Amino acid sequence: MTRTATAFFAAATIVLAAAPLHAQEAYTHEIKLQKGDAFAVKRSQDLLIDQKMMGMTMKVTNQSNAVWSYSVLDVEADGTAQIQVTVLSMAMNLENPMIKIKFDSSAGAAPTTPEERMVQGFVGQTFFIRLSKAGEALDVVGAEAIPEAAFAAAQFPEANMMAPMLKAEFASAFTADSLKKFHTNYFGGYDGRQLKAGETWTVEEPSEQMNMHSLSKVTYTVAESTAGLLDVASSVTLSPDSNAPAGSMGGLTGTGSGVTQIHLASGLPVLTTGTGAFSSTVTTQGMTVGLNITSSERAELRPTAGALLGLLK
């Protein structure tokens, strides 16, 4: 499975002393985990949206931070890892003319509003994935119950008009299919390709964000490895998809860039960063809306138990 334009782009801070990968050598990407391994991934995403409609401009800020732990329960004969994923913390800063949420579960303050209780309600929730050696998420189990639990804890009053919208948004993010795609993009996406310094290739495929359908063109370039880490640079171009399904609100136009550094010994992405700038003119409920979106992403991986402690410093 190839990476989409919405995949995390990665760069690393973890150093392992190892021989470098030179131009004539190739590396076959494989995730190598053992029973008892565990690691945590801290993810952050910042979205700033300028929305123009009927001569007015509305600004939307959507910032999120979360720490998820991954515990390897078992490894099958073919190297597929059975992993329990737990939400350790969650922070949200969402602000637009209709709603404002600002809460960090790791700050220690007790939630006092339904929105804050919703954010806190994600903490401690678990689901399970099966991750192949190629980094493909084969199965996801138990994720759909997480938004239900968070919204049960929130206790929104029936008159709250934003609650159904928030619930629908989180429910779409925690489906088995969306989390399979999310984890495959993060851990894999190279289709067993041998990665060789100086190699470059391009992947074109449909992409969907917020019911906007685009064509993504992602070009990857492999650099030489240093200190046991292999750089894969990514540049993405989005354009509207002329074959978008009925009901699509339009497509995005824009560019993004980032770097993936792979830890050679384990195959894990150890830190992710990326930026992008996109725009669109969409039609919804009979109105034309102009969008300008800037985004930045980061995901940092740290070992917490097992053999990974000896590999990742």
Image (spheres, helix red, strand yellow):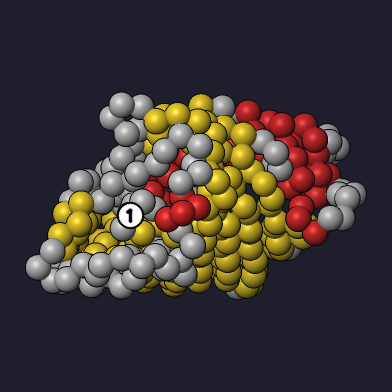
Which residue is disc 1 drawn over?
A: 265
Q: Is residue 130 visible?
A: no
Q: Is residue 116 visible?
A: yes
Q: Label 1 amino acid?
A: Ala
Left or right position of 285 against 240? right
Q: Nearer the viewer, residue 120 or 27?
A: 27
At a point 46% along the width and 50% down the height, the residue shown is: 308
| Residue 82 sits in quarter | top left
Left or right position of 172 against 148? left
Secondary structure at badge 1 equals loop
Q: Nearer the viewer, residue 119 or 35?
A: 35
| Residue 272 sits in quarter | bottom left
Q: Quadrant of the N terminus?
A: top left
Left or right position of 312 against 58? left
Q: Nearer the viewer, residue 49 or 121?
A: 121
At a point 70% along the width and 39% down the height, the residue shown is: 124
What x and y, as percent, mark residue 218? 27, 62
Image height of 162 relative to 50, above or below = above
What x and y, as percent, mark residue 208? 40, 49
At a point 56% along the width and 27% down the height, the residue shown is: 142
At a point 43% along the width and 44% down the height, the residue shown is: 183
What x and y, as percent, mark residue 159? 84, 39
What x and y, as percent, mark residue 48? 58, 69
